[in-house]
Amino acid sequence: MRSFSLIDFVSLFAALRWTVALVVLALAFGAPLALGLAMGRISRFAGLRWTMAACIQVIQSVPLLGLLFFFYFGMPVFLGIQVPALVAVTIAYTLYTAAFLGEIWRGGLEAVKQAQWEAGACLGLSAWQQFRHIIAPQALRLSLPPTVGFLVQLIKGTSLASILGFVELARAGQVVSAATFQPLLTYALVAAIYFALCLPLTLWSRSLEARLDGSR
Amino acid sequence: MALVEIRDVHKTFGKVEVLKGVSLDVEEGEIVTIIGRSGSGKSTLLRCINALESVDSGEIRVEGQKVHARMPDLKKFRQRVGIVFQAFNLFPHLKVERNITLAPLLTGRIEKAKARALAEDVLTRVGLADKIDAWPEQLSGGQQQRVAIARCLAMAPHLMLFDEVTSALDPELVGEVLKVMEAMAKQGMTMILVTHEMGFARNVANRIVFMHQGRVWEQGPPAKLFANPETPELASFIASAK
């Protein structure tokens, strides 16, 4: 046993890089997929709508822990595919992000009145131009608070990657706590770091919301 | 050849047949007002003319071109046929200028450098040049509707459709919108309106079309139609609209 020292502090912050890396990976792959899912969910092709809805339903119904287990432990057993841990967690977090963001963004897109599409169409704009210039900007503003809310969930959700051996913030907290016998101090510090990570996001979202809402 | 030719058009929503064989010609420069009770099919007919709804049978031709939702040049076609809605449908996230210039820029009708001048020009025509930098929600209903008309004018349409454009307005704001439309009529724009404004129908239109139960029931010049309705349905409609 040793007392809590600077080295412990540093190791917590060092572990933060995995937390950030996992979030970045999840967003980099998950966000484009989410956009695809959201657009599929509002498509005029019923088959596409149902397929997307089913995918989202399945992913949302499985706990994040279950997704992580499946892609790391399950895939080799059921499908005979063994992938490195980083690939497994990337797939799991990507799907998790895509499903939740996809539904959030679908809600935003559907909240924009149908008449707005129509008004664009009547001016001779293509479906893509209507989406890009009329629907998406309005949907973005509507979706911003829940999107940032999900982002905060995602940051905290990366702690689950510790079960596959990733020494991210939560896991580092365990290690430091075990070494120093100072669980209260350590976990308070871990919590403070998570908070410091999430707070600016929420503030940024609020200012962005105000800025995008140019009409007020 | 008439600018708009409508031949025996039928349209059904679910089990309800809304249009039961409508035929109508509109000549270039004509102001045609469609009147009738709610549910008589007037708005549906208007929406069919620019392919917002597709017809089940019969055909609609505009400038000789057959109109339907899958027509090859739908986008180009819609640039030539403007429509103004009851609910304005301005883009709330864009300022007035951008509301007007978005479509002309995206469709390549004008260059970026001339966009503001175009917005100023059409806004002047609807009497709102000073509102170019306003947000839609800062405007009254009447002003929003005039911006919606200006947005259409910016595309230099050959034909304008008006779908009950004053119905959502407070009574004191109706006049300013009608005045703009009257000015457009004087400048020779071909216009088809669905309206409950009998005064406008009587004074500005060249022809009144009375629709009843999905059919063109009676039509003719306003003076004749209002003074001597031939059918009891039109007579009772005129009486109730007073």
Image: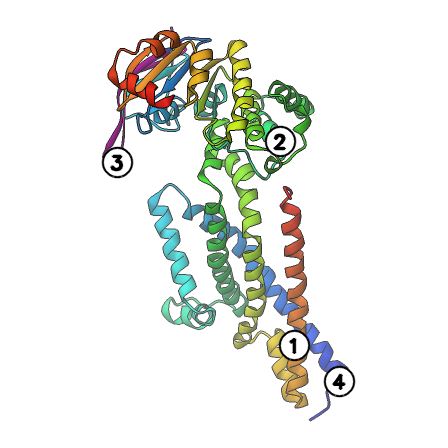
Residue type indicated by callout 4: Ser
Q: Amino acid at mark 3?
A: Gly
Circle 4 SS class: loop
Disc on the earlier residue, 4 or 1: 4
Q: Mark 3 Cα within 10 Å, few/some/many (few <14, many 20+)?
A: few
Q: Chain of mark 1?
A: A
Question: Dot 3: what SS?
Answer: loop
Give the residue at mark 2.
Answer: B96
Residue A67 on image: x %, y %: 45, 68
Three-letter amino acid code at disc 1?
Answer: Val
| Residue beneath disc 4 | A5
Tag 2 secondary structure: helix
Who's the residue at 52% across and 75% down the image? A164
Alpha carbon separation for disc pair 2 and 4: 61 Å
Q: Chain of mark 2?
A: B
* Image x and y of residue A173, in percent: 63, 80
Q: Which residues are magenta?
A: B1-25
Circle 3 sits on which residue? B14
